[in-house]
Image (cartoon, rainbow, N blue to C red):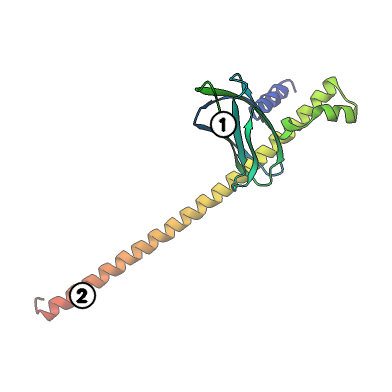
Amino acid sequence: MSMLLPLVFFFCFFFSTSRALWITIPTGGTKCISEEIHSNVVVLVHYALVGGTPNSTISSKVSSPYGNELHHLDNARVGNLAFTARESGLYLACFWVDRNDRGGDIILDLDWKTGIEAKDWDSVAKREKIQGVELELRRLEGSVESIHENLMHLRGREAELRNLSESTNARVVWFSFLSLGVCITVSVLQLLHLKRYFHKKKLI
């Protein structure tokens, strides 16, 4: 048990789905980040400009793997977004500068939470009247469930890729046999044609 707990905490850290980032956005440029998210996963996003002039603003856009627009906000210094992923794949978030009186780069503070990290644990604690160690154990339990779901998803992806690889290898083998058969057939036909030609010319 003493060896299991550090391992669980390691996996919880490794599969952490809460990301606080500082992004440098150049004036006239665009910065994008992406994350692969499973379907039916809750996502919370908060972003705010750090520094700059009071008139500095940015625009933001978040898109689903199929290009559906989930969020679009112009001329803002602060933004919030919450959604539930409807499809699995890469979700893309892009930011660009609308206005920057000083010129140069702008710093964006981005807090991106998914899955168990996006859950409102304060509401859970009040609703179920738990706190302290019990609340932390509930969070740990949720993290372990999230890790299990991630591992099952990875196992499913591995099986799909393995099946695709086996199918591709089988097609390559059949194509190789077909190519060999075509080459042999063409060679035999060429020999018959040459033999007929030489007989006709009375060379053999």
User: In x, y percent, where is residue 129?
Assistant: 90, 26
Q: Amino acid at mark 2?
A: His
Front one among 97 and 101: 101
Residue highlighted by disc 1: 98
Residue 65 lies in quadrant: top right
Q: Which mark is residue 193?
A: 2
* SS category of the residue bearing label 2: helix
Question: Which structural element holds mark 1?
Answer: strand
Q: Quadrant of the C terminus?
A: bottom left
Give 125 or 33, whichever is nearer the viewer.
Answer: 33
Q: Quadrant of the N terminus?
A: top right
89 left or right, relative to 126:
left
Amino acid type assigned to the residue bearing label 1 in the image:
Asp
* Horizontal arrangement in the rendering, residue 67 relative to residue 136 (left or right): left
Q: Is residue 13 or residue 88 the one in the foreground?
A: 88
- Asked where in the image residue 117 lies, by quadrant, the reply is top right
- Residues marked 1 and 2 touching at CB (< 8 Å): no
Q: In front: mark 1 or mark 2? A: 1
| Residue 43 shows in this picture | no
Give the percent coordinates (x, y) of residue 97. 55, 30
